[in-house]
Image (cartoon, rainbow, N blue to C red):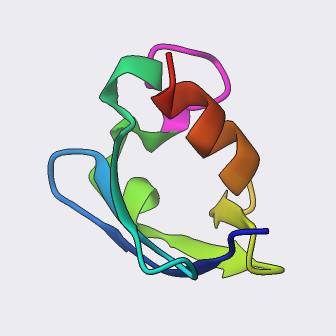
């Protein structure tokens, strides 16, 4: 299973995610900022306050989370 090694939040609400399989993903969260789940992340300071938990989940300010499976799944759409 692919693990998240590092994540760098960018000023344009994208995430640069480094994975254990030597790939990097640029994930654009802007389209999801209208959803109730992610609307609090429109504030750039909150967006940048995230960490990796269990090498597979991104957590923002304790208010929402997104797993690597969800990230990969949404990339394919």
Q: Position of residue 29 (x, y in %)?
A: 39, 36
The residue that appears at 67% across and 27% down in the rendered structure is: 37
Q: Is 69 situated above or below 36?
A: below
| Magenta span contains residue 47 | no
Q: Position of residue 47 (x, y in %)?
A: 41, 55
Which quarter of the picture shows residue 52?
Answer: bottom right
Q: Is 42 situated above or below 44?
A: above
Q: Magenta part mainly helix, strand or loop?
A: loop
> In the rendered structure, which segment of residues is drawn in magenta?
33-40
The residue that appears at 68% across and 55% down in the rendered structure is: 68
| Residue 30 left/right relative to 74 | left
Outermost residue, left direction?
11
Residue 66 visible in the displayed image: no
Instruction: Please give the count of numbered marks on the rendered protein.
Output: 0
| Residue 7 left/right relative to 52 | left
Q: Position of residue 18 (x, y in %)?
A: 43, 76
Q: Identify which residue, 33 or 66, lies in the foreground.
A: 66
Q: Quadrant of the N terminus?
A: bottom right
Q: Is 27 situated above or below 22?
A: above
| Residue 29 left/right relative to 1 | left
Q: Position of residue 23 (x, y in %)?
A: 40, 70
Q: Identify which residue, 2 or 8, lies in the foreground.
A: 2
Q: Is 6 situated above or below 26?
A: below
The residue that appears at 52% across and 36% down in the rendered structure is: 40
Residue 14 visible in the displayed image: yes
């Amino acid at each position: 299973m692919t693990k998240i090694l590092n994540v760098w939040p960018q000023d344009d609400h994208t995430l640069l995610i480094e994975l254990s399989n030597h790939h990097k993903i640029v994930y654009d969260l802007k389209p999801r900022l209208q959803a109730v789940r992610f609307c609090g992340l429109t504030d750039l300071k909150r967006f940048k306050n995230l960490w990796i938990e269990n090498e597979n989940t991104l957590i923002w300010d304790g208010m929402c989370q997104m797993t690597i499976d969800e990230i990969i799944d949404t990339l394919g759409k």
